[in-house]
Amino acid sequence: MSEHEGLPRVGVFVCRCGVNIGGFLDTTAVMEYAKTLPGVVFSKENLYSCSESGTVEIKKAIQENDLQRVVVASCTPLTHEPLFRAICQEVGVNPYMFEFVNIREHCSWVHMKQRTEATEKAKDLIRMGVARAIKLEPLEPIEAEVEPSALVIGGGISGLAAAASLAERDFPVALVEREKELGGMLRHLYKLYPSNVIAEEVLNDWKARVTNNPLIDIYLASEVSNVKGFIGNYHVTIKSPERETPLKTGVIIVATGAQLWEPPEELYGYNKKEVITQLELEELLRKGELKGDKVVMIQCVGAMSSERNYCSRICCVTAIKNAILIKEMNPAANVHILYRQMQAYGDEYESYLRRAKEVGVRFVNFSPEQPPVVEKQQVKVYHQLLGRELTLPFDLLVLSTPLVSQRGSEALAALLKVPIDQDGFFLEAHIKLRPLDFSTDGIYLCGCAHYPADVGEVVSQALGAASRASIHLTKGYIKVEPIVSSIDEELCQGCGLCAGLCPYGSIEMVDTPKGRKAKVITVACKGCGICASSCYCRAIRLSHYSNEQVEAQIRALSSAE
Amino acid sequence: MLDAGRHPNIELLAYCEVQGVEGKGKDFTVHYLKKARYVKEGVCTACGDCAAKCPIKVDDEFEMGLKKRKAIYIYFPQGIPGMYTIDPEHCPMILKGKCGLCAQICQAGAIDYQQKDEEKTLHVGAIIVATGLTQFDPSVVTEYGYGRIKNIITGLEYERLINASGPTGGHLYRPSDGKLAKKVAYIQCVGSRSLKHNDYCSSVCCMYAIKDAMLAREHDEEAESYIFYSDFRVMGKRYQQYRLRGAEDYGINYIRGRVAEVTEDAEGNPILWYEDTQTRQVKSLTVDMVVLCSAAVPSKGIEQLAEILGIELTPNRFVKTDPFHPTDTTAPGIFVCGFCQSPKDITESVSQASGAASRAAELLGITSSDKRTVA
């Protein structure tokens, strides 16, 4: 066809996504419309483009029609771009000749009640996609070597388990602990639920695995003071009072744990004597110094509140455990647990809760609107299930306070260029699907640095983070998305604006025979485009989102008939 | 799912069952049954012409029986591998040698009525158990009337109803009369946290009920939701904020109390009888539909699998682990992850899955490619 002369051969696939798209706009009309666009030699509807049968149809169409550009109009590149790119590659089309048009999140889902308009908008989006596709250029992935070693920050149970697992697989590990000894929070605990094993025994087991492994270098009383580089090639400085040690490492695992929130004195008369925290109770139990036989515990002290609007997960079962321990030591003891929502989840904690009731621990449900009041040696609390106020005298009042983000988390986050959430915990790449990754490749997360968790859960996560980190260590190289910036040295005036703006530290200023110029560290570039869009001299070109490509898209939008 | 299906290092053995395991860590021989699909793998193109012509209609398990499927079917559209399977319990050709329509229709020539189950073996270094969960049948909790009162459905049935690709296109048409359900009650702990049925907390129902209620409101601005709970389990990251958002932005009503009984009025509207334990008043509430958040239990066949693998289970039939080594089963070389180890959400399952992978890699000595000890 003459109208396509000089243009690459474009194929357009319109996905119905079951009824997610097909139910809200006319995909057949959209598919027919696509056929009329310049360059488009093939167009087809799929029930699910991403299904195995859909992908087979796409591959077949590419081969039979000798397609040079592939446009899929369906859902989001976030989840499906890698798949469609891979399909292109399998049949010999450079994966960067693929263009994704989102007609679900950007169209059918937001215009569910406007079928006609949604159909027209989908046509607009596809016209723009095709215009951009025509301008696409083939790109080749960038490869970089990976130093097969790891840095683990934090020597508590999560850091120990992650380090032990990686060293077990012959990867050298540097384990950095801020304190003078390993062990973190577990050093302060007495017995662990639900099996009542001594915390020190669990800890010693993991410590032995770490200290006995010659591949693990332990840095005590040390902190990470500087981090440069990118996945596979981090240059880190470890600082202790005596010296600064430079270190090269491939990946970094953040296992810095959490700390217990210490209540202020005015809260329930906290005084570390007869009004103490659960952590201080652990210490009393460990030393066998518990006195008195009237114990009251209050849950959610400083948690599930406007300041710390989350449940600290471990406090309910911790209270149950300590209450049972007290009853076992002294069956005559009177133990009350004042709670809001009992968090006895999983396979075992429900029966653990019942066991506490069986040994005589009393549970009192209160509402946050009517919190307990402490008067001298007694607690007054409105038991909302009984509908009356109880007066509970105590020898010991134990406050279950939440785990909060670790001291220094913000500084470490800034050093590693990773985010933290509104509660101060480190923010993972995806709450459900990537809980152990940061969005920056090469940095991983586990344990209470992510969110409060019990020892078993922490070990699960630590082993998991080791697994995630080991993927690149095992391969020995990484492939970086070739969507990166490049500098035209002729146009660059060396102002340094881009280097200052780059959030990944991937632009450096260098002296060249032509003067001071910006230089992109290609493997560290994430292709965000901040530099290109802010360069006064238009000296920066972002591949795959070049001015020509984006302008073609904009022109196509305004060319509607 | 498709990622796993396409990964060069993963071979998916779908429609197969493990029958026996010999050996130990680093060197297992696994005997498994590859069940006959009566359709040739690699030949079927999943075009669907066969199912369109198949005259036999049976309840669709994927749609929780809310829809029919044919005797030649694909479990769900995005399923892997993307191919059809003949259900031998319903296909007249397999049962009595009569019909054969699908073989006539199939352009690819993929139908093979003579296919037999095959016994196969496989050699592996490590085994990971990840058999997940299924939903407890709430009809044994007779006071809630499931199976007797039409407008009482389970959490999984609700998932299909509210799904835009589901049998009702995402509209909450209630089963008795197809009327749009606007007022929906969710009952927590149905058959869980119970000495009579399942003595544990399923750990995910509180949160999915909030999500269900939010979806209802997103579909219909007039939707009203009531969640009956005993302790709200909000122990995950950002769960408490989600719960508050449910009340503030979606108008969800949370009522602390275990529903005693559900009856039905003349129009088929369920009536919930309960004590609001925060006000200690006995009340009733008439709604359009009730969703039972029924206990999640270990998948069917876990006992047989445990016996084959030589691993122990807990009294609640979860795979037993040491509390501080939650990815190790009681048999060396066999690891575990996900709900089958203990009730947990997707996030925790994903973390633990990576953890189990780590343990397997430790056992097999998988290290950097240039010093690999095991191929």
Image: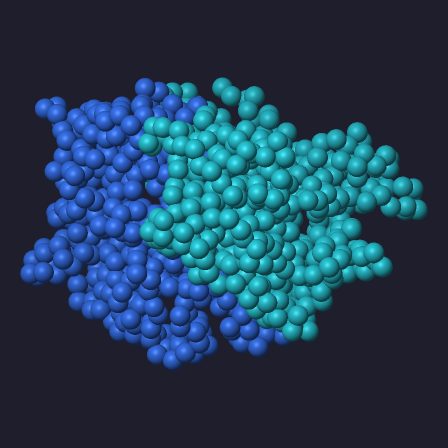
Chain colours: A cyan, B blue
Frontmost residue, A304 versus A273: A273
Report the side of A232 relative to A126 (left or right).
right
Work out whether residue A168 can be spotted: yes
| Residue B311, image x, y percentages | 35, 70
Asked if residue A553 is positioned above or below residue B299 in the image, the reply reads above
| Residue A169, image x, y percentages | 59, 70
Residue lying at 80% horizontally and 57% vertically, measured from the top left:
A240
Asked if residue B202 is positioned above or below residue B114 in the image, the reply reads above
| Residue B242, image x, y percentages | 46, 33
Report the side of A293 relative to B229 (left or right).
right
| Residue B75, image x, y percentages | 27, 50
Asked if residue B356 is positioned above or below residue A430 in the image, the reply reads below
Frontmost residue, B364 versus A103: B364
Work out whether residue B12 can be spotted: no
Report the side of A387 relative to A273 (left or right).
left
Quadrant of residue B222 within the rendered picture: top left
Figure disc tally: 0
Residue lying at 25% horizontally and 30% vertically, measured from the top left:
B275
